[in-house]
Image: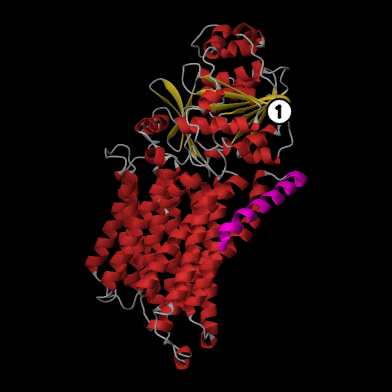
Amino acid sequence: MGWFFALFVVSGFCSILYELVWLRLAMANYGVTTATVAIVLSAFMAGLGVGSWAAGWMVRRFESVIRIPVLWLYAALEALIGISALLVPLELAIGHNLLRRLGAAAALSSSGHYLVSGIPLAITLVPWCSLMGATFPVAMFAIERTLGPNPRSFSFLYLANVIGGTLGAVLPLLLIEVSGFKGTLMVGLGLNLLLAAVAILVTRRLPRQSSEDAKFEPQRKQGSRWILFLLMLTGFTSMAMEVVWTRLFTPYLGTLVYSFATILLLYLVATCAGSQVYRWTARRGPNEGAMIWTLVGLSGVISLLSADPTLRMPFYLRPTLGIVPFAGTLGFVTPMLVDRWANGEPYLAGRAYAANIFGCVAGPLLAGFLLLPYTGERLSILLLAMPCFAVGIAIPIFGRAVPRSRIRASVQYAALAAAVGFALLSHSYEQVLPRRYVLRDATATVIATTIGGRKELLINGIGTTRLSAITKMMSHLTLAELRHPAKQVLVVGFGMGTAYRSALSWGVNTTVVELVPSVPQMFAYYYADASQLLASPLSHVVIDDGRRYLERASDVYDAIILDPPPPVETAGSSLLYSSEFYRLAKAHLQPQGILQQWLPYGDPTLQSAMAKALKAEFSYVRIFLGIDGHGYHFLASMQPLPSRSAEELAAMLPPAAAADIVEFGPKTTPTEQFRSVLRTQLDVDAMIALAPAAPVLRDDRPVNEFFLLRATGEQIKNIQESQAAWF
């Protein structure tokens, strides 16, 4: 059994490794949007469910004719899974190219894009993930064939798989930083092939089966069919809670890949602990289920208290207290239910695990597209916990094997009342903000507020921008440097609308692309002329991922102004900083057009990697410090950039733009504003020399997002300051 445990630890590690990398590759090909993430996760989980069910059925159907060692079948599965490391990136690229051609021909809307993109994503991921799901019933069949029937074999393998998944939530992040996504996939390939080789070698250490053993027909005794419903409920609730936690704890953890990894790590560690507790207690006899379900419901609502900003506690304790109790109880319940249903029989275990997985498919979709946009985080948590309380109350009433008890019922109703009380008495970060305006959609919770007399824009509790002359300079410096008057301008990132508003002051057609639908609706909070500008025939607001928009757009622009939301390390942000993106943007620039990229800060490795990426795609690159000495303006073009003086740049401004550029100061004239920036020009080669060994920032090497191994105290401080908002 030790060999089986070791195999499933490594197998669980590889599964999470592939999930993390495939998700990111899909975002690069189909867009950094909530819909893309939901489609990928649903396809991944659906594949696990299909594979588990199909393998269980095949084991039962053909078990009497299988003569080869069953571990050879497991070895074949692991080898095939390893091949996915080579083929999935290729399949994603093929699907992306096909969709790109279809979008150009049919002018797909954003919603139409998601409907169509789900097809190639499912075709790519479901078959490979089904191989992962098939490993459970096949391994259980191998245990049954070689070591005899084991009624708790699923929970045994489940525990090992979760331990491996816990490692997979951490180590791949370090591998990606060192070797990129492709190198990390090669590690997964090597481990899968190693698993296949070890599984074949282990057959020599297992008992030999006779012909009579091969025809062994184990006694099958399945549990109540209600168990399948409960397994779907646990899968649905767990995955839906993960989606809500991501939104709930963002103000404290931030938007980094390490933030999401923290949630996943806490969830898996707690699940592992709960599974082990179940394994210990199961040896003493069956567990009483009613109180366990009540505990699941109550522990789910605890996250409302741990996320309450009015309660003072270290930030790292908030997700720990909010996630660990719930995940631990579900880690206890899920293997318990599968064991009770299957009693170690591979076919029944495959069905049970598939039921759990199909609940996992529905959970993120309902939470992301219905619960969060329409009810918010706090009510979503309460609604997801209520079915668990209902099950706990129903078991003593309808269950034949559980005696009724007034004491038990009183405890359950008291726990339910406590959960409702937690929901009513706790506070969200939105409620403690002054003069707030809140909008929710499937992408984010957007808040416009004023803190300390300064207007702020918060997205999921993170301060993303403020009214600043820097944002104005992004447009004015770029348009004033053009060799010819601009006719078409593209702004990626709406924010408060400052760069977009400044571009419109030049009287040019301005298209602005924003990922979060609710953000442009806050424009009027920051500027009195918002409605007039939005109604202008020169204004075009597009809700889409900036990179995906350029993929399907045919327009050519005189200037492209990029202002990705801070922090620079935000998960997925490298897709707007990479050389592949700059190559795409270059194809949408006029021959003498200019691309402006804003970098709010960066350690030497990031600065060098980004400068290399721009220099690799553009012949001419100039760098200026921000108007207050903060951050960097990168101007890139395929033609030489004119070296105009501050007076010449100011003379290029139309009257409306001249008034706009000094609206927030700090200087009183356009000439002084430009002069304060021009005198800070930096040499691009000098920036590259800050870290000459740094790799070029590419889609495969997202230097800005994965930084833990090179992180310094100063860099961590910059990240914290960039994310600091009301708290």
Residue 308 appears in the figure: yes
Q: Amino acid at mark 1?
A: Tyr
Secondary structure type for disc 1 = strand
Q: Residue at x 46, y 45 (%)?
A: 178
- Height in image: 318 above or below 418? above
Specify whether residue 601 is painted magenta: no
Q: Nearer the viewer, residue 604 or 653?
A: 604
What is the quadrant of residue 454 in the picture? top left
Q: Position of residue 642 (x, y in %)?
A: 67, 15
Q: Quadrant of the N terminus?
A: bottom left
Residue 223 appears in the figure: no
- Height in image: 467 above or below 513? above
Q: Return the residue at label 1.
A: 557
Q: Residue at x 73, y 30 (%)?
A: 556
Q: Residue furthest right?
A: 105
Q: Residue at x 69, y 44 (%)?
A: 109
Q: Position of residue 560 (x, y in %)?
A: 65, 28
Magenta stretch: helix, strand or loop mostly? helix
Residue segment shown in magenta: 83-107
Q: Nearer the viewer, residue 719 or 9?
A: 9
